């Protein structure tokens, strides 16, 4: 068990670091949305996907460490109480830092999501006002002949 507690603390710290990255990306996403910069938004979302993949690996390590400590099914808030007394303060501090970082991430991620959803509703409303018919199944899922570009966008390759 002696080697497992430092390993668990290291995993918690790595997860917290990943959440810090996601928080910074959420802040950048908000700025990209505010400035209508679709290229920056795309870049941020690609970076976000890479961090999320890393976080999935960290989550597997966390589950393995928790299982090895015999704490499977124990809520994060109770892990410190179930650790040896000499490790409890350090584990409690790591858990608190992790929870605080998660709350900060959620605050920024929720704001970014709300802004994006608002933008999408605005686009849909504008398209509707311009007479565009709503696509039943979302973009890219219409019938083949509906997906053809308008005549003004077609190119004559014989020229």
Image (cartoon, grey):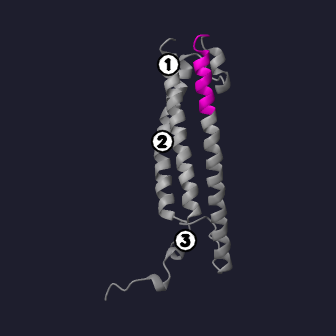
Element class at badge 2: helix
Badge 3 is on which residue?
A: 143
Element class at badge 1: helix
- Residue lying furthest bottom: 159
Residue 59 location (% of width, % of height): 53, 32
**Which stretch is magenta?**
85-99
Among numbered discs 3 and 1, the one appearing first in the sequence: 1
Residue 141 location (% of width, % of height): 55, 65
Q: Residues within 10 Å of mark 2 (few under 14, many from 20)?
A: few
In the image shown, does 15 or 93 lie closer to the viewer? 93
Q: Based on the displayed image, in which of its 4 quarters is residue 118 positioned?
A: bottom right
Element class at badge 3: loop
Q: Residue at x 46, y 49 (%)?
A: 47
Looking at the magenta stretch, what is its main secondary structure? Answer: helix
Q: Residue at x 65, y 50 (%)?
A: 110
The label nearer to you, 2 versus 3, is: 2
* Above/below status of 110 relative to 132: above
Q: Based on the displayed image, in which of its 4 quarters is residue 76 positioned?
A: top right
The label nearer to you, 3 versus 1, is: 1
Residue 158 location (% of width, % of height): 31, 87
Badge 2 is on which residue?
A: 53
Left or right of residue 107: residue 2: left
């Amino acid at each position: 068990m002696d080697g497992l507690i430092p390993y668990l603390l290291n995993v918690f710290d790595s997860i917290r670091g990943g959440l810090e990255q996601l928080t910074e990306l959420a802040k950048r996403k908000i700025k990209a949305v505010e400035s209508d910069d679709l290229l920056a938004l795309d870049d941020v979302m690609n970076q976000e996907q890479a961090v999320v993949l890393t976080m999935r690996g960290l989550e597997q390590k966390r589950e393995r460490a928790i299982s090895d400590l015999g704490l499977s099914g124990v809520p994060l808030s109770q892990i410190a109480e179930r650790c040896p007394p000499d490790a409890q303060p350090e584990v409690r501090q790591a858990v608190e830092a992790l929870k605080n970082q998660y709350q900060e991430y959620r605050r920024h991620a929720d704001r970014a999501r709300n802004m994006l959803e608002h933008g999408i509703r605005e686009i849909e409303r504008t398209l509707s006002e311009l007479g565009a018919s709503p696509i039943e199944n979302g973009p890219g899922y219409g019938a083949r002949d509906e997906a053809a570009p308008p005549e003004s966008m077609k190119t004559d390759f014989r020229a």
